[in-house]
Amino acid sequence: MIRLSTTDADFDAAFTALVNARREADDDVAKNVTHIIKRVRDEGDTAIRELTKLFDKHDLDATGWRIDRADCLAAWEGLEPRLRDALELAAERIAAYHIKQKPEDSDSIDAQGIRLGARWRPVDAAGIYVPGGRAAYPSSVLMNALPARAAGVGRLVMVTPTPNGEVNPLVLAAAHIAGVDEVWRIGGAQAIAALAYGTASIVPVDVVTGPGNAWVAEAKRQLYGVVGIDMVAGPSEIVVVADANNDPEWIAADLLSQAEHDPTSQSILFTDDAAFADRVAAVVDRQIGELATEATARASWDANGAIIVVETLAEALPLIDRLAPEHLELACDDAESLFERVHHAGSVFLGRHTPEAIGDYVAGPNHVLPTGRRARFASGLSVLDYMKRTSFLGMDAAGLAAIGPAAVALAEAEGLPAHARSVAIRLNT
């Protein structure tokens, strides 16, 4: 774990190194993914069958390529009431939040009598990737499927790896409540390629969303353009800003909530109290030993964790903007005023009683968020990722006469005479 203070003589260099630390896929992953994508494109189902046997250790012809909707319903009906209630609450809140994001069409007449507007329509088909290796995430099913449903997507396809052929019933139950149309038991880069290119068994989709490991992220990056994607997501990250009025037990738990995801995850604390920083560090070390995910959390905290002491919490804000974190917790008295000054973060959690983990499950906003400093230019998953906008315009002779000469002048200046003639011939008429 890195310990820094803004009063250190070498702070600028040390913090820059922290910001620029690379925790994502290496060149070998990119090369291997390129090979997998080519195989799926050229060999289709044969490649999917062989790669699933290699990576997930089961034969699709024996275990079954597709999971029936009846199996998803059975998984839902078999849940204990407490889990069913939790999934229902999460689904209701996530759906309610995202339906408000659906954009409205526009249609108006301007001062020259020209009709201008835009029409929003959902993509025909969307694919969602749900991890199934290190852990199974029914919450990811809801976070990806329900915005697509809110957008009005007609066909919703889910792919999820099933190591050794084993299926997580919670994931299937979530697929049922979210209204997923197809569930395929394939994962990895080969699943992304199958969704993009299609195979004899799997009809291709228009957009692929959802988190995954480095291979999945790299496959999405390479296939963008063949298919739409939400983002290229990397390892999870959290930045917590906390003053000494917090309980160090709470803050330590918040930091570890991301560290337990993966050894490459990153957890960073900013505080204006060095003694509080010491207490949090001690509690983190103790709490790690109490986790079932101890090995993962320890590797993440030791390699990528950081505690940074600032003179004032406001001093942390430009540093946070440089990190552009996936998750930002403002656990302090003046959370609202600090929030107003934050420019780059995937999602912000305001106040001492708003842990990031609540946003992963039941709060409503999406938990699929930009990582690796991409919050500088990207946003979390939303209804808009499953929609596209078509602009339109219409004009009569008077409208064309009002703005046409300017178009002719610009086309001639650009050396495009056919463009100019297309407008001018109508003006002459």
Image (tube, rainbow, N blue to C red):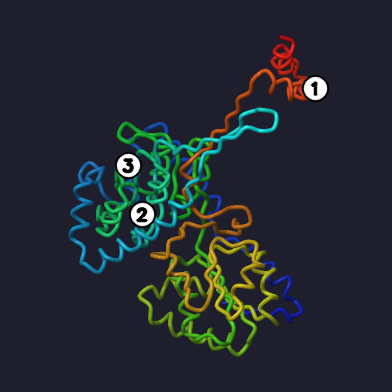
Instruction: Give 301 or 80, whichever is nearer the viewer.
Output: 80
Above or below: residue 256 compared with residue 38: below
Q: Secondary structure at mark 3?
A: helix
First in sequence, mark 3 or 1: give its number: 3
First in sequence, mark 3 or 2: give its number: 3
Q: Which residue is painted at 58% across and 30% down in the image? A: 392
Q: Residue 401 at what x, y percent from top left?
A: 73, 20
Q: Which residue is painted at 48% across and 82% down in the image? A: 284
Q: Residue 104 at what x, y percent from top left?
A: 51, 43
Q: Which residue is painted at 52% across and 55% down in the image? A: 380
* Residue 2 seen in this snapshot: no
> Disc 3 or disc 2, which is closer to the eye?
2
Q: CA distance from mark 3 to mark 2?
A: 26 Å
* Residue 393 seen in this snapshot: yes
Contact (Cβ within 8 Å) of mark 3 with mark 1? no
Which residue in the structure is indicated by mark 2? 141
Circle 1: residue type = Ala
Circle 2: residue type = Val
Contact (Cβ within 8 Å) of mark 2 with mark 1? no
Which residue in the structure is indicated by mark 3? 50
Q: Quadrant of the C terminus?
A: top right
Instruction: Give 119 or 194, whichever is nearer the viewer.
Output: 119
Q: Residue 117 at what x, y percent from top left?
A: 58, 34
Which residue in the structure is indicated by mark 1? 409
Contact (Cβ within 8 Å) of mark 3 with mark 2? no
Question: Which residue is farthest bottom?
Answer: 275
Q: Quadrant of the N terminus?
A: bottom right
Q: Is residue 95 left or right of residue 236?
A: left
Within 10 Å of disc 2 (Cα), the crowding (few <14, some 14-19, many 20+) is: many
Q: Secondary structure at mark 1?
A: helix
